[in-house]
Image (cartoon, rainbow, N blue to C red):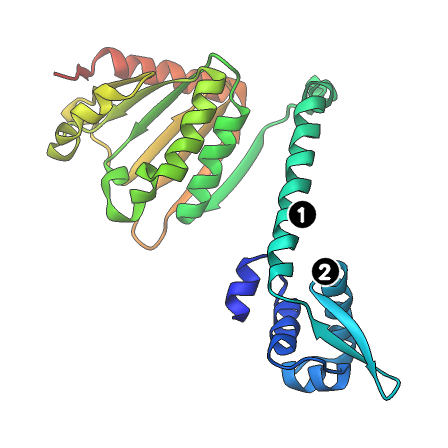
Amino acid sequence: MIETLSKLGLSKNEALVYAALISHSPAGASYLSKKCALARSSVYTALASLTAKGLVGTSYKNEIKQFVAEDLSAVKEMLEKERLETEKRLQLFEKEQSALQMLKADWLKVPNIVIFEGQEGLKKTYMSMMRQIEPGSVMYVIRDEFVWHPSWHFIFEKEWHKKVKSIKAEKDIQTKLLVNDSKEERINQELYEKRKGLAVRFLPKDDRLEKFAIYINKDTFAMLSFEKGNMVGVKITNKNLAENNIKIFKSLWDKSKKLK
């Protein structure tokens, strides 16, 4: 239950206290402190937060303040309230985005280097590049066959695909992709051909990649190593670096094989 409550947005202490109150209400702070193995100050902090979220109410027994877990429907109401607040913030952001963008001064465009690790790092880096890319731009990608490995299957799942497709459609982003000329990639030619806004070519045999990928847009360059047990990458925001890597990409593109 505590794990589930944490996934629903409660902090660890909030989840401990609320779970204790669900199984035993009403209860005083002393009981909750012992039950949850928390200091009384931590219990009171969690109770205050839970009360503000509408998950805990109060009562009195022999003039001693007691705490009561509200019905589990209160959790749904809390989530609905958070959803509505998030939607309002998104609407405000959309409304003020252009004004906020004007605050960016040219002198602030210094090289921004981010090192990331693991699959989650790549996911976040890719999505940040997609969000930052200018409308009508091209994303240049060179990679090995990592996307076909079972651990990367989420790329083809509905939620991820819908998110990426929406950004690409909204910004009219085209993708040029260079991949190894391998049996694995040849099998998926038909899938590539069906993707709108995607152009694919096979790398020459001598330029075959191993456990490696590169992503380039107008002013950002990212590369990733898939070395077993040491997946790591780096993203650099620098227009000159990105533009020169695009030139290298185009040179490779010109000598690569078209799908057939």
Q: Nearer the viewer, residue 225 or 35?
A: 35
Q: Nearer the viewer, residue 153 or 1?
A: 1
34 displayed left or right of 63: left
Image vertical order of residue 180 relative to residue 81, above or below: above
- Residue 226 seen in the current view: no
User: In terms of secondary structure, where does tag 1 sit?
Assistant: helix
Image vertical order of residue 191 relative to residue 63, above or below: above
Q: Residue at x 51, y 64 (%)?
A: 4
Q: Which residue is mark 1?
A: 81
Q: Amino acid at mark 1?
A: Lys
* Viewport quadrant of the C terminus: top left
- Residue 46 seen in the current view: yes
- Residue 99 falls in which quadrant of the image? top right
Mark-to-mark CA distance, 1 and 2: 11 Å
Q: Nearer the viewer, residue 60 or 140?
A: 60
Q: Residues within 10 Å of mark 1 (few under 14, many from 20)?
A: few
Q: Residues within 10 Å of mark 2 (few under 14, many from 20)?
A: some
- Residue 254 falls in which quadrant of the image? top left
Q: Position of residue 30 (x, y in %)?
A: 76, 86
Image vertical order of residue 177 relative to residue 251, above or below: below
Q: Nearer the viewer, residue 131 or 105?
A: 131
Q: Position of residue 228 (x, y in %)?
A: 29, 52
98 displayed left or right of 221: right
Q: Residue at x 74, y 73 (%)?
A: 42
Q: Which residue is mark 2?
A: 54
Q: Residue at x 89, y 85 (%)?
A: 63
1 and 2 marks in contact (CB < 8 Å): yes
User: In terms of secondary structure, where does tag 2 sit?
Assistant: loop
**Which one is earlier in the sequence, the residue at label 1 or at label 2?**
2
